Image: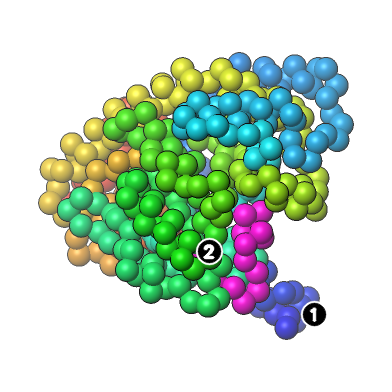
Amino acid sequence: MLANLPGGAAFPIRPNAAAAPASGIVEVFDYGRNRPGLLPLWVGEGDRPTPPFIAEAALASLRDGETFYTYQAGLPSLRAAIAEYLSRLYAVPVADERIYVTGGGMHALQIAVTLTAGAGDEVIIPTPAWPNFVGAVTVSGAVPREVAMRFGPGGFAPDLEALAAAVTPRTRAVVVNSPSNPTGWVATPADLAAILDLARRHGLWIIADEIYGRFVYDGVRAPSFRDVMAAEDCILFVQTLSKNWAMTGWRVGWIEAPPVLGPTIVNLIQYSSSGTAVFLQRAAEAAIRGGESFIAEQLARARENRAILLDAFSRENRLRFAPPDGAFYLFFGVEGIADSRALAFRIIDEANVGLAPGTAFGAAGQGAFRLCYLRGTADIAEAAGHLVDVVRRL
């Protein structure tokens, strides 16, 4: 069955392509783009450029003429660097053969969805969630099943009973993003074990997005499925260089999967990107091998800005939030406000601050906003003051 675009009956396209959801973040971004003095806290990146030592590795590669086709799975040296990094971070051995380099985290996610679900299948997504999860599932032809997380005094938590109730004979996978974009929720080992048990009982894949695993405010790294899984468990890890090393524009990531899936993943890379450019991979390797001090700086900055926001927001009774345990977002609501999309536009006009409306993150995000605080401390303090002022005038 084909679908027609509005006003474009002569150009029929597939329904799953036409159904790709528009980004509620981009809509607000476009409205406030290029406003003088606007504080852009709407997208998931900081304001620091990529460290020079990473950029220099890319430039050196180009100067050396590394501009040809390369390994579809990724440079052996980069795959080894990633495996060593993961082995060290999680204190479990990770083989090079489990790592496949992709064109960013989104490419890794698309491959993971393609491996696990297609037309007629269902994928469970706890929400509020990064909108690209729903988008990737929709474009694949599968059906995203949103399951609202519970919100209480301690913040967000998975509703394990609702997750179990959402499983149908058509369910193929569940997406788990911890630390969470946008809520800052960090799964406990018990959460992960319970979700893994559910997946085992129903023969489901887990697509694990642990991209913000280094951004935690208690401990060295977030709990991971690696802490509870067995070698035979059906888990696909999607990752990116974007967040830890300020490389959002470079588009380099990886998918980690059982080696038996290697030939299939390599084929999917071949038919989607034909591999990641060598100079980008050289930069990625430099980041992973030499970027620990930069990650520490990023985390210190996030921790300071988090404290500023929590202090400012706690002084306004109409603001509803829980301190994020991970990532670098504050997900908050305003008492008495149901339409966060409309208020996001008003905040741009009255406060000159750009926020992502909660509606962009699923139905469970209605009435809320996501604020990215990985920026200069002065900017965050100024934005907090403007936002509190707007709320008091509502």
Locate the C terminus and report the quarter of the image it occupies: bottom left
Kindly indicate the quadrant of the structure image that contains residue 99: top right
Separation of disc 2 and disc 1 at Cα?
40 Å
Label number found at residue 134 = none
Kindly indicate the quadrant of the structure image that contains residue 95: top right
Residue shown at 66%/27% (left/top)?
A: 80
* Position of residue 22 in the picture relative to residue 353 (left or right): right
Residue shown at 47%/29% (left/top)?
A: 91
Q: In the rendering, at what x and y percent does residue 45 appear?
A: 48, 38
Residue shown at 54%/53% (left/top)?
A: 233
Per the image, label 1 sits on a secondary structure element best described as strand
* Position of residue 201 in the picture relative to residue 74 (left or right): left
Kindly indicate the quadrant of the structure image that contains residue 7: bottom right
**Towards the viewer: 42 or 382:** 42
Closer to the eye: label 2 or 1: 2
- Dot 2 and dot 1 residues touching (CB under 8 Å): no
**Towards the viewer: 33 or 250:** 250
Residue shown at 41%/22% (left/top)?
A: 296
* Position of residue 222 in the picture relative to residue 5 (left or right): left
Q: In the rendering, at what x and y percent does residue 129 appear?
A: 43, 57
Give the tally of numbered discs.
2
Locate the N terminus and report the quarter of the image it occupies: bottom right
Q: In the rendering, at what x and y percent does residue 86 appear?
A: 53, 31
Magenta region includes residue 191:
no
Q: Which residues make up the magenta segment?
A: 111-124
Label number found at residue 204 = 2
Q: In the rendering, at what x and y percent does residue 381 appear?
A: 27, 32
Label number found at residue 10 = 1
Question: Image height check: is 341 above or below 388?
Answer: below
Q: Amino acid at mark 2?
A: Leu
Magenta region includes residue 113:
yes
Graded by Cα atoms within 10 Å as few (under 14), some (14 to 19) or many (20 or more), the crowding at tag 2 reads: many
